[in-house]
Amino acid sequence: MATFFLGKHPHVELCDLLKLEGWAESGAQAKIVIADGQVQVDGATETRKRCKIVAGQTVTFAGYSVTVAA
């Protein structure tokens, strides 16, 4: 499982995380897969494109998984 570090930021928006991890080619593609219910946050389906992901949460999509850390 990979780790995504927030650095100085308190959170990352879900659609941005998918782009930054290379799971989506564009913001538009990220928003589509989120709206389609293909992304899980802490095991629950998340359809809010701009959901704020904070340290300690795990995001899963298409067999990939990443844990967010401060």
Image (cartoon, rainbow, N blue to C red):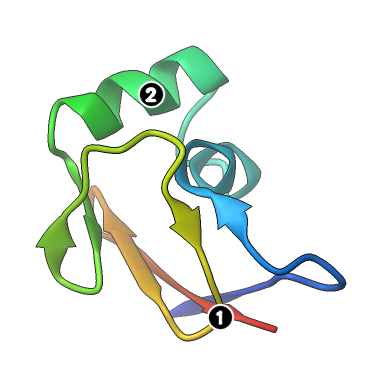
Foreground residue, 6 or 26? 6
Residue 15 visible (yes or no): yes
* Looking at the image, residue 61 lies above or below residue 59: above
Q: Residues within 10 Å of mark 1 (few under 14, many from 20)?
A: some
Q: Quadrant of residue 63 in the image?
A: bottom left
Q: Quadrant of residue 57?
A: bottom left
For the point 47% across and 13% down, the residue is: 28
Q: Who comes first in sequence, dot 2 or dot 1?
A: 2
Kind of residue at disc 1: Ala
Structural crowding at the residue carrying mark 2, measured as other residues with C-alpha within 10 Å and reported as few (<14), some (14–19) or many (≥20): many
Q: Looking at the image, which residue is at 16% across and 40% down?
A: 38
Nearest the viewer among 61 and 41 is 41
Residue lying furthest right in this view?
8
Q: Quadrant of the C terminus?
A: bottom right
**Residue 55 numbered tag:** 1
Q: Taking 52 as reference, is 25 above or below it?
A: above
Percent from the top left, x then y, of residue 3? 57, 78
Residue 32 lies, in percent from the top left, at 30, 19
> Image check: 23 left or right of 7?
left
Q: Secondary structure at mark 2?
A: helix
* Residue 26 in view: no
Q: Residue at x 49, y 62 (%)?
A: 53
Would you name the residue on which mark 2 appears? 31
What amino acid is found at the position of numbered circle 2 in the picture?
Lys
**Which element is circle 1 on?**
loop
**Residues at marks 2 and 1, CA–CA distance in whole angstroms:** 21 Å
Query: Residue 41 appears at what percent x and percent y?
Result: 27, 63
- Residue 27 image point, x, y percent: 54, 21
Q: Which mark is residue 20?
A: none
